[in-house]
Amino acid sequence: MPGLRQGRTMTLISATGLSVRHGGQLALSGVEFAISAGEIVTIVGPNGSGKSTLIRALIGLEHAASGQVMRRAGLQIGYVPQRLHIDATLPLNVRRFLSLPRRVSDTAAAAALARTGVEGLERRQMAALSGGQFQRVLLARALLARPAILILDEPTQGLDQPGIAAFYRLLAEIRAETGCAVLLVSHDLHVVMSASDRVICLNGHICCEGAPRVVSAAPEYRALFGLGTGGTMALYQHVHDHDHESGPEHGPEHGHHRSHDHDHPHGHEAHHAG
Amino acid sequence: MLDDFLLRAALAGLGLTLATGPLGAFVVWRRMAYFGDATAHAAILGVALAFGFGVSVYLGTIAVALGMAITVAGLHGRGHAMDATLGVLAHAALAFGLVAASFLTEVRVDLSAWLFGDILAVSRGDLLVVWAGAALVLALLLWRWQALLTATVNEELAVAAGLDPRRETLVLTLALALVVAVAIKIVGALLIAAMLIIPAAAARRLTHGPETMAAAASLIGAVAVLAGLYASLRFDTPAGPSIVAASACIFAALLLAPRGRS
């Protein structure tokens, strides 16, 4: 049965019945997850909803309390962590950082930096980079491993809206060029990367899952997303079939997370009430 | 002028700095200073036990230092409050070592040699052990260099790249125990950590890459060994502390000197 076989090898990482404990607390429970080759998946959820925990469990940084995580044998993961603190006592320039853990040629390093829009930074110390440059250098390093999947933990944190749009465009281009899957975490519940094939809303468990709504050209959307985002962002409509009101894990942040002053056409609360 | 014992002392010190440079750089980058102290202090207990059981001092120190280093690394993995725990372990090991040594008349006479080192009494056999140990540590670090550096920059990046950071921690733990065992005769248990940290911290002021920093740490350590030995001869001061004092002077001079290009 070649079809079945193919289907199995196309799955890069999957989790079945995955639960993770932090001390006594259940950080994740009963998560079913799979990502296929070339797919872009965005995980959204409020702070403390277990987004980073899920990513860490998928990579192998967290142990499953129950359930299991399967990674395709020999899977190359390009990981871009949320934060990376480089100790001030460690002198490390961009060029040297790109050669960790595998040494790469100068040509390959320069090409990776150019691809992520930070060409010519080789001699700069990592500690001297701006937040946006740092993020792109991390991405360049991840790309040098020729990953089958890129995993990014809140990569747009600290970027302004044009910065986020440019970063999303870059990720979409990289997927188109290399065919690598992209797994992305965002704390923005409603505005996601429009190239996402799927959006997963997480809050200790998977609340809902679906495709994002690509933002139309209507003026109210333009006003919402600002100019120059070039259709890189999309709305995600949550359809929750359960209620969190009595749940202890449900924080007040589950509603509108961003401080947009807008009339959201598909408000989170509205669906909760139903 | 260049007496035989002085030549042996210089060669022993220079051999040691081959290992303390790169290892010291990792100790500084990973903030393992207290870790080094705990391991080195445990060596005194190793000396006492070695005399008590009549085995080689090198064997005793390396066994106890390795035991301590693995204990500390294990506690670190389990997320204990490290500062207090390391303080307890470092000083308890020293105290128990001194108490144990007090039962042995042979060691008691010579205790200051183990605490502060006795580089001028280094024999040909010791010289061989120092160079072999330092070469082994250097080879170990060079072999694991890329993985060690990746795990030091970020453990998550290392895991995502298929490395096991615990294995790299174990490599450093083993290297530390080896260095403690060969360094105790040269600078003594109390000042081994200083030989690791001070030259590396001084080298940070001069360098812009991890490899150059490790090499510069060895070089600064070597200069400190020669300067310390000279001072020891000239002013009749204890050799081990003089070497550490010399490296501290180099560190201070670099700290006060205006920084070059950045």
Image: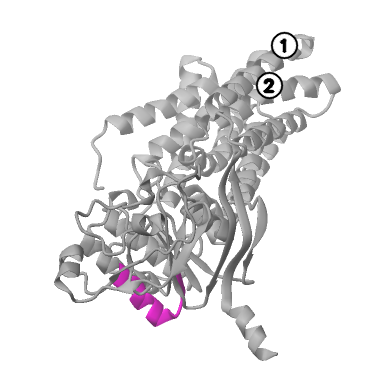
Q: Amino acid at mark 1?
A: Val
Q: Tell whether B172 sits left or right of A41.
A: right
Q: What crowding class fits label 2: few (fewer than 14 Cα within 10 Å), some (14-19), or many (20 or more)?
A: many
Protein chain holding label 2? B
- Residue at the bottom extreme of this rendering: A2
Judging by the rendered image, the residue that carries numbered circle 1 is B99
Quarter of the rendering containing residue A31: bottom right
- Residue at the right extreme of this rendering: B53
Taking depth in this image into account, of B241 and A35 the one nearest to the observer is A35
- Residue at the front extreme of this rendering: A274
Regarding residue B72, the answer to whether it shows in the image is: yes
Q: Tell whether B138 sits left or right of B204.
A: right
User: x, y percentage for residue A10?
Assistant: 58, 79
Above or below, comparing residue B145 to residue A180 in the picture: above
In the rendered structure, which segment of residues is drawn in magenta? A168-182
User: x, y percentage for residue A204?
Assistant: 52, 51
Q: Tell whether B213 sits left or right of A134.
A: right
Quarter of the rendering containing residue B50: top right
Q: What crowding class fits label 1: few (fewer than 14 Cα within 10 Å), some (14-19), or many (20 or more)?
A: some
The residue under the point 49% across, 40% down is: B30
Above or below, comparing residue B171 to residue A141 in the picture: above
Residue B44's label in the rendered image is 2
User: x, y percentage for residue A225?
Assistant: 20, 65
- Secondary structure of the magenta portion, mostly? helix
The residue under the point 68% across, 21% down is: B44
Question: Helix or strand or loop: what does disc 2 sit on?
Answer: helix
Question: Helix or strand or loop: what does disc 1 sit on?
Answer: helix
Q: Amino acid at mark 2?
A: Ile
The residue under the point 32% across, 29% down is: B253
